[in-house]
Image (cartoon, rainbow, N blue to C red):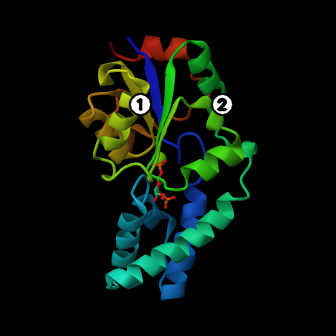
Amino acid sequence: TIKACLFDLDGVLVDTARYHYEAWKRLAADLGFEFTQTDNERLKGVSRMASLDILLSVGQLHKSEAEKQELAARKNRWYVEAISKMGPEEILPGALSFLKDCRESGLKVALGSASKNAMTILNNTGLTPYFDVIIDGTKTSSAKPDPEVFLLGASGLEVEPEHCVVFEDAEAGIEAARRAGMRSVGIGSPATLGEADLVIPSLEGMTVTRLRQEMPA
Ligand code: B16
Ligand code: MG
């Protein structure tokens, strides 16, 4: 039986990937190289410092730890500036009605995001009240594919992992769910999310009834 749903934020409930991309691209331009949309795919679901390491490898640059801290902070200032202007219209199609359906159906709801900026995004879009438990990048020490973020979510909800379903757009997140002993729904393409128990293009049209029908027991 399904008793709880755990949601990733970026790419599942809101489309913040484009703000991350704009900020990383601007940082790369400051450093004198181009960072493409394709390069950016590799940053999905990855933590801020790991993202910076990938970006620097694309530019074939080596930086000291202190320089890296400064570069990450610079990118984050631009990103925070962008998300501070977000509103409820930036919630992805189907996300709000599915969250409401979960609550009305008596399922518990948690957030499991790698982002340290999750609270700003949830508050600006009005999504905060839909969550019983919020686990974000300020509460975890290991990044996805480590299962920590989802295990903390499940224990906060007091639901066993076998009764939890994770919604994720990143391969690392699907792997984290599997390692947590949870079932998963991939949001995106089966080509990258094939390891998920169910793959759907978006939350549009998703309901608790449909989830119960399509999710293997
Ligand atoms: P921040 P998620 C992740 O959020 C993003 O997908 C990833 O691109 C980002 O680098 C990471 O959060 C850290 O974000 O710099 O705001 O702490 O998909 O796990 O909700
Ligand atoms: Mg994501």
Q: Name the residue at 44% across, 55% down.
A: 44
Amino acid, disc 1: Gly
Q: Name the residue at 61% across, 71% down.
A: 78
* Quadrant in the rendering for residue 165: top left
- Quarter of the image for the N terminus: give it: top left
Lateral position of residue 52 relative to residue 21, left or right: left
Residue 96: mark in rendering: 2
Query: Is there any visible trace of residue 59 in the rendered image?
Result: no
Lateral position of residue 114 relative to residue 118, left or right: left
- Residue 162 vs 62, above or below: the answer is above
* Quadrant in the rendering for residue 123: top right
Amino acid, disc 2: Leu
177, 40: nearer the viewer: 177
- Sequence order check, earlier mark of 2 and 1: 2
- Quarter of the image for the C terminus: give it: top left
Q: Secondary structure at mark 1?
A: helix
Q: Secondary structure at mark 2?
A: helix
